[in-house]
Image: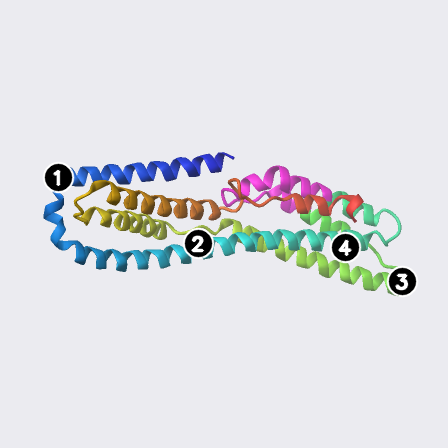
Amino acid sequence: MRTIIALCLTVVCSMAVSVAGLLATRAIVPPAFLLPSNEICGGYLQTVGTIYAVLLAFVVFVVWTQANDVRRLIERQADELADVLRITKVFKGSAGSDVLVAARAYAREVAEHEWLLLRTGQSSPRAQELLEQTWTALTAIEPETAREEVLFSEAVSRFSEFGDARADLLHCGRVRLPVLLWLLLLSGAAGTVGSMYLFGAAQFWPVAAMTASLAGAVSFMLFLIRDLDNPFQGDWHVSPALIVAATDPTDN
């Protein structure tokens, strides 16, 4: 909910600032002075606007793809871990329960601590330690029959896939848009919206409405990019709930 409020405030403020800038420009430069160059300004705005729109669309695609990749990695982790726990139930003694206990401790650490660290591109050493404990418990299993050997081999393979998915997730959690790209996005927004100030229409409010709508649309896109750039933060963040659910004995 806070993200929605922040989004509305960002859009409204950008629209207000754009209209205020237009007012200041009109106070300094009379419309009659700009009127002869309207045709040139129209072509310029069309070119700049098209280039900036393509850039915005590309960046939105990149951050949206990254967010979806993170979701898929979480689902992959949950699926592989659930399969490991399901397989280890077959083994006699405390082997399967030891794996489950270690896996549940890992899931709690991820949900309660590591997810907050991932917002800043960090990971939890404790989560990695618990992951190693889960691996130790799994490799302590000693298959006694040919059937158990096949199942054990499959459990090890699934756990390796789980570990790979975790490593990929940690890498994705550290990837952010570079500062230079943000400078390009912000300067492009200022240049595109500022181009509206060059039109010398006699009536103020039609130009003000177009300027405000353009500023609002651009600021909305920039806010969306900023929020999606960090998939672990904001109202649209990904959740570790699937990983926790995978270690629930009632679901395995």
Residue 168 image-quadrant placement: bottom right
Q: Main secondary structure of the magenta part?
A: helix
Q: Is the residue marked by circle 3 packed among few (<14), some (14-19), or many (20+) residues within 10 Å?
A: few
Question: Which element type, helix, strand or loop, lies under badge 1?
Answer: helix
In the rendered view, would you say 217 is above or below 44?
above
Viewer-closest of 117 and 64: 64
Q: Earlier in the sequence, mark 4 or mark 1?
A: 1
Mark 2 lies on residue: 60
Front disc: 2 or 4: 2
- The stretch in magenta equals 104-130
Q: Amino acid at mark 4?
A: Thr
Question: What label sits on residue 139 in the rendered view?
Answer: 4
- Tags 1 and 2 in contact by the CB under 8 Å rule? no
Question: Which element type, helix, strand or loop, lies under badge 2?
Answer: helix
Residue farthest to the left, as pictured: 33
Mark 3 lies on residue: 145
Q: Is the residue marked by circle 1 packed among few (<14), some (14-19), or many (20+) residues within 10 Å?
A: few
- Label 4, label 1: how far apart the Cα atoms are: 77 Å
Q: Is the residue marked by circle 4 packed among few (<14), some (14-19), or many (20+) residues within 10 Å?
A: some
Q: Is residue 122 magenta?
A: yes
